[in-house]
């Protein structure tokens, strides 16, 4: 996704230091924000809003089973929702 001035992909260690960390500061996100924490937040917001597990899995390139396993705890209580 991101390349150096010469068109080569950034290595992980350089991506974090040269691309992601400055973007986190510029966006005024908390220090220590990672791409993983942004992914977790995105999935949590979608599930909390009632988006289907299948759709969320497609958006993040994962399986519905993995979404349920990792993020199932953030889903609204279906008993309350269907009452």
Image (cartoon, rainbow, N blue to C red):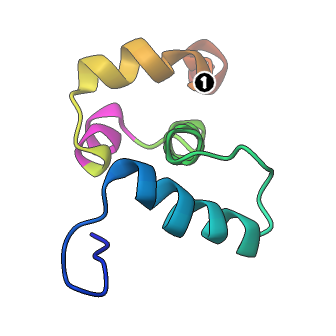
- Assign the N terminus to one quadrant of the image: bottom left
| Front-lying residue, 35 or 41 | 35
Q: Which residue is drawn at 58% across and 15% down?
A: 73
Q: Say few, some or many: other residues with alpha carbon within 10 Å of mark 1 (under 14 / 14 to 19 / 20 or more).
A: some
Q: Residue at x 52, y 67 (%)?
A: 18
Instruction: Tell which residue pokes out farthest to the bottom in this image.
Output: 5
Q: Residue 52: give x, y in percent of width and height.
A: 36, 38
Task: Give the answer, above or below, for where 81 lies relative to 37.
Answer: above
Task: Give the answer, above or below, for where 35 lies relative to 47.
Answer: below
| Front-lying residue, 77 or 69 | 69
Which quadrant of the view contains residue 56?
Answer: top left
Magenta span covers which residues?
A: 52-58
Task: Give the answer, above or below, for where 48 lies relative to 81.
Answer: below
Task: Give the answer, above or below, for where 69 lies relative to 25.
Answer: above
Q: Name the residue under label 1.
A: 74
- Assign the C terminus to one quadrant of the image: top right
Q: Which residue is drawn at 21% across and 28% down?
A: 63
Q: Residue at x 32, y 72 (%)?
A: 2
Q: Does the magenta run of residues contain 13?
A: no
| Front-lying residue, 46 or 4 | 4
Q: Residue 58: give x, y in percent of width and height.
A: 23, 45
């Amino acid at each position: 996704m991101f390349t150096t001035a010469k068109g080569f992909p950034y290595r992980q260690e350089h991506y974090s230091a040269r691309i992601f960390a400055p973007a986190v500061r510029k966006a005024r996100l908390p220090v220590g924000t990672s791409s993983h924490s942004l992914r977790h937040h995105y999935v949590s917001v979608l599930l909390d809003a009632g988006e289907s597990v299948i759709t969320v899995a497609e958006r993040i390139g994962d399986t519905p089973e993995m979404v349920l396993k990792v993020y199932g705890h953030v889903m609204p209580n279906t008993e309350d929702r269907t009452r």
